Image (cartoon, rainbow, N blue to C red):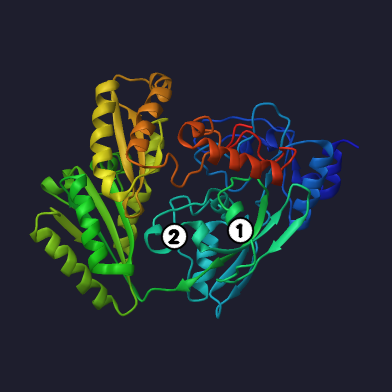
């Protein structure tokens, strides 16, 4: 029996896609990687996933796990050989349990992030992972890349939000690790090994995640700033003034928001005059456990002092939920506006917060000196040191010319990241985009240990080959 016949027998022909039906699963979100596959399979249960893994292992066929296909590093796209099977988790979309007393929710890997947020909110709880793609990305993909988003400052990355996992191993066995425990010192932490592994060690099929009380009130403000140095200064003030109540601190270059308002005219900046043309903006969010009045008083006190001291040039505090959503929509529209202008050279970097301003000053100057016709597109989660430091084409530079510069731009930006004690990947992962870059920025012992883990858990190299590591 051929593998294709066996998969059809296991899942039913409707859930084994080939030809045109498989095409949407073979192109990544950025349209940078176009792969091919023997088939795309859509298992409906963890047992189905285990059966698919066992079948592929018998036939020596690699597997590429895929969630919502919103990744930015090509980590869920097969190569061009057509030898792999893509395993879509789309049908693994059930909320299995919500435990209010334990503040946990157990969901399957194919659950869309927004659906998890809504399920938690329906029970009076908060699941705080939040990112621009939350309407289409899935929990499995969030786990595979250790996604960050806009509330890492308060709640941590996906890893910090995860208590237990269910995983299918390379042998097709099921690890039932869905424990809702906050303390469990019974040996090696397998959970942390699989989170962030990008499907190269096993297939995550479900997770038990942390929930939190819903805040009584939130306050959101958009602030106009004269420099990135002032943005770092303001963050220190906000941390001192708000403590753990500071749940979001987003940085955006003025050019980013100008691009959003140009391409999406239904959106507008809530400033007039000079403030509307500020070179930098910050978006702050405060979550309060007492009252809306208390939250607003704290907000106005800290921001008022920052304005008086000249750190903030202007501020708009949302007066309603609708206004708060509009401010966040400006921030979340930046990647969409960037995509509208064509492909860019993306960097998802992490820098110690104390060195971010210097990193931007130095790297901007070097790029402008080295590459005529480029423009910087800088935004990100300043509160946790994560910048999306992207390079786009300006007037007079074609898209092909920009992409031809990509290796040299990578070299320059990543060298600056390393010089500032940073990381070349903060929340997007490695995938195939940064796989060949990784050996330059990881020590030989780190790479050797990672390869030993890969060989131990996936001895035949069938899980997501060609991603993360050069094997």
Above or below residue 247? Residue 227 is: above
- Residue under pointer 1: 191
Q: Residue at x 30, y 79 (%)?
A: 291
> Circle 1 sits in a helix, a strand or a loop, which is it?
helix
Quarter holding residue 216: bottom left
Mark with earlier residue (2, 1) = 2
Residue at the far right: name it.
1
In-front residue for pair 304/275? 304
379 or 447: which is nearer to us? 447
Percent of width and height locating residue 108: 64, 60
Q: Residue at x 33, y 20 (%)?
A: 397
- Horizontal and vertical percent for residue 426? 43, 46
Image quarter in which the N terminus is found? top right
Mark 2 Cα-neighbour bin, 10 Å: few <14, some 14–19, many ≥20: some
464 relative position to 223: left or right: right
Q: Residue furthest front?
A: 445
Residue 470 seen in render: yes
| Residue 97 placement, left or right of 340 | right
State the residue at coordinates (60%, 69%): 184
Q: In the displayed structure, would residue 356 be above or below residue 45?
A: above
Label 1 packing within 10 angstroms: few (<14), some (14-19), many (20+): some
Q: Which residue is mark 2?
A: 156
Q: Nearer the viewer, residue 59 or 35?
A: 59
């Amino acid at each position: 029996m051929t593998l294709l016949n066996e998969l059809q027998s296991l899942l039913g022909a409707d859930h084994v896609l080939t030809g045109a039906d498989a095409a949407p699963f073979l192109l990544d979100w950025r349209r940078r990687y176009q792969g091919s596959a023997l088939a795309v399979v859509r298992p409906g249960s963890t047992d189905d996933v285990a059966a698919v893994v066992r079948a592929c292992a018998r036939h020596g066929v690699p597997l590429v796990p895929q969630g919502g296909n919103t990744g930015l590093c090509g980590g869920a796209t097969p190569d061009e050989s057509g030898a792999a099977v893509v395993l879509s988790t789309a049908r693994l979309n059930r909320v299995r349990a919500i435990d209010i007393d334990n503040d946990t929710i157990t969901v399957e890997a194919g659950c869309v992030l927004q659906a998890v947020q809504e399920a938690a909110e329906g029970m009076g709880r908060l699941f705080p992972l939040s990112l621009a793609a939350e309407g289409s990305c899935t929990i499995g993909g969030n786990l595979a890349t250790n996604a960050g988003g806009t509330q890492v400052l308060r709640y941590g990355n996906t890893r910090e939000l995860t208590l237990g996992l269910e995983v299918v191993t390379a042998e097709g066995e099921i690890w039932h690790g869905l424990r809702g425990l906050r303390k469990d010192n019974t040996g090696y932490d397998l959970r942390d090994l699989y989170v962030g592994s990008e499907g190269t060690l096993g297939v995550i099929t479900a997770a038990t995640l942390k929930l939190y009380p819903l805040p009584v009130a939130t306050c959101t403000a958009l602030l106009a700033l004269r420099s990135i140095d002032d943005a770092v200064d303001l963050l220190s003030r906000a941390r001192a003034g708000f403590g753990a109540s500071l749940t979001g601190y987003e940085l955006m270059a003025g050019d980013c928001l100008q691009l959003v308002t140009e391409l999406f005219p239904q959106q507008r900046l809530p400033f007039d005059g000079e403030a509307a043309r500020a070179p930098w903006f910050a978006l702050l969010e405060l979550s309060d456990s007492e009252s809306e009045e208390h939250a607003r008083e704290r907000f106005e006190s800290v921001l008022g002092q920052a304005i008086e001291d000249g750190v903030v040039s202007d501020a708009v505090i949302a007066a309603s939920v609708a206004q708060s959503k509009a401010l966040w929509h400006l921030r979340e529209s930046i990647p969409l506006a960037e995509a509208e202008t064509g492909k860019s050279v993306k960097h998802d970097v992490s820098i110690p917060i104390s060195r971010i301003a210097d990193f931007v000053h130095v790297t901007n100057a070097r790029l402008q000196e080295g590459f005529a016709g480029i423009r910087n597109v800088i935004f990100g989660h300043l509160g946790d040191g994560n910048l999306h430091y992207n390079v786009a084409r300006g007037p007079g530079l074609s898209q092909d010319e920009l992409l031809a510069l990509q290796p040299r731009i990578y070299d320059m930006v990543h060298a600056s990241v390393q010089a500032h004690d940073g990381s070349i990947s903060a929340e997007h992962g490695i995938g195939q985009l940064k796989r060949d870059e990784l050996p330059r920025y990881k020590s030989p012992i780190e790479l050797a240990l990672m390869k030993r883990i890969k060989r131990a858990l996936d001895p035949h190299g069938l899980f997501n080959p060609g991603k993360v590591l050069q094997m």
